[in-house]
Image (cartoon, rainbow, N blue to C red):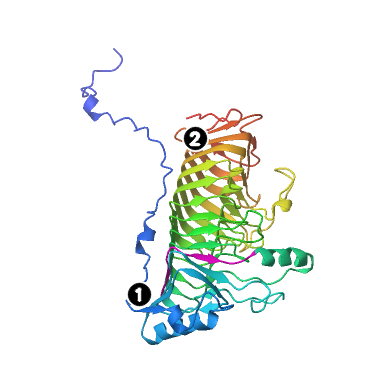
Amino acid sequence: MLYPLVDEPMPSIIDKPDPPVQTKPSHDPTFATNWGDTIKVPSIATGEFLITDFGASTSSSDNAGAIQKAIDAAAKAGGGSVIIPAGTFISGPLQLKSNIGLKISEGAVLKVLDYTSYPGSGTTAKVASFLDLSGTTNVLISGKGIIDGQGGDWWAAFRATKPTGGIGRPAIISFDDASIIEVQGITIQNAPNGHISIHRGNKHVTIAGVTINSPADSPNTDGIDVWSPLVNILDCHISCGDDNIAMDNETRYMTIKNCTFGSGHGLSIGSYTSGIDHIYVSDCVFDQTDNGVHIKSSRDRSGLVEDLVYENLTMTGVSTPINICEYYPDNTIPSSGNADKAEPVTASTPTWQHIFLKNIKATGADNAGLLWAVPEMPIKDIVFDNVQIEAKTGMRANYLGDCFFINGSSIKVGSGKAITSAYGSSITGIDQTTGTPTE
């Protein structure tokens, strides 16, 4: 024996380290999505002011003066509800005031003055909105009645003048610098331009149970435009001729739940996309909408977009269920994935990240989707979680940094590859040819 025996302890299994636990990385949002619970809603005093007591009548060609008198009287009394009773009342533009409720009763139609009579019509100047809530606090527009924008002549005049710049057209409801605002239960139809514009500087806004209806070919008739934080859109039905909902710069902490979207360009973010974050969309139905989830912008009008959650969505006959593209308008999309060169990153470069798509089913689509970032700033951390898409053709996906298909997400196409282009992308969890999960 070359070496003497040495007393050494026998190895013990107790001393062995535990094998590493095999865990999958989490692809869930790192933030809660219940910010909608914090939105304040109006509380209106009990007094009522019937517009017919102030001279309004169904035979009048313009009730704006009488209705404004009722609004002013309610404001002078410290607040109360201005009542539009059953019947058809024509009116020019109105200015609401703080602590006022405008109730459009069941059977009432508040009809906007026609194109030839509306103040400022036929010019390129900005035209006053029909109901202006700017600068107000604690305002409620409610009821089961209808606001009819009589948009047909406006649309015709706009089409005729579009080659030379078009004419100015009013929104039905709009406001800047307002707070604690609610529009509840009413129907808005045939808007000359947008239906509801939640413009800049607002907070604590609720749109609930509202039906928006304008023809699919009516120009620029967005359903709801948003440029402000702290907005809830709940239980609405929106069919229109442009974006069903459009979220632009400074839209933050917004909730969209239990809504149905018909004709229109989709549930959109953009095309101005600077400072947009914490958007929660759930339990919505899309029926024959052009797009489902739609994010659109370009190098000269974007910035940071992050922390978006879309879940529990059903899409039927939606042409493009997921359309997330940093080239806008569409005619600027490159001819191929490598046809555009990277440019220097600036403050307006699209910087999009942390986008979660969960429990989504889309059938009858023309194409599975479009996901296309600029080459200098790939989209980061986009998650498809239990997303099933059935489409005629596949998805184009270029410049995606970390795109995950998890929990059985799949793309089924009638012909060709499930993902037809994936230039400069990192995509995992799906067979890009067959569209089947690879987890």
Q: Determine the secondary structure under disc 2.
A: loop
Assign the N terminus to one quadrant of the image.
top left
The residue lying furthest to the top in this view is: 1
Q: Which mark is residue 44?
A: 1
Identify the residue at image location x=64%, y=59%: 345
Identify the residue at horizontal 32%, vertical 76% (top origin): 46
Q: Is residue 275 magenta?
A: no
* Upstream in sequence: badge 2 or badge 1: 1
Q: Residue at x 27, y 28 (%)?
A: 16
Q: Are marks 2 and 1 in contact (CB under 8 Å)?
A: no
* Magenta range: 139-151
Return the residue at label 2. Answer: 409
Residue 31 is tagged as none
Q: Residues within 10 Å of mark 2 (few under 14, many from 20)?
A: many
Instruction: Residue 168: tell me if it is visible.
Output: yes
Residue 250 visible in the picture: no
Q: Position of residue 52 (x, y in %)?
A: 45, 79
116 versus 371 height, above or below: below
Image x and y of residue 208, in percent = 43, 60
Q: Nearer the viewer, residue 22 or 368?
A: 368
* Residue 70 left/right relative to 352: left
Q: Position of residue 263 (x, y in %)?
A: 59, 50
Q: In the rendered image, which quarter is residue 217 located in?
A: bottom right
- Residue in front for this viewpoint, 372 or 14: 372
- 221 sits left or right of 74 in the view: right
* Residue type of the residue flagged with mark 2: Ser
Query: Is disc 1 placed on a helix, strand or loop?
Result: loop
Closer to us: 210 or 372: 210
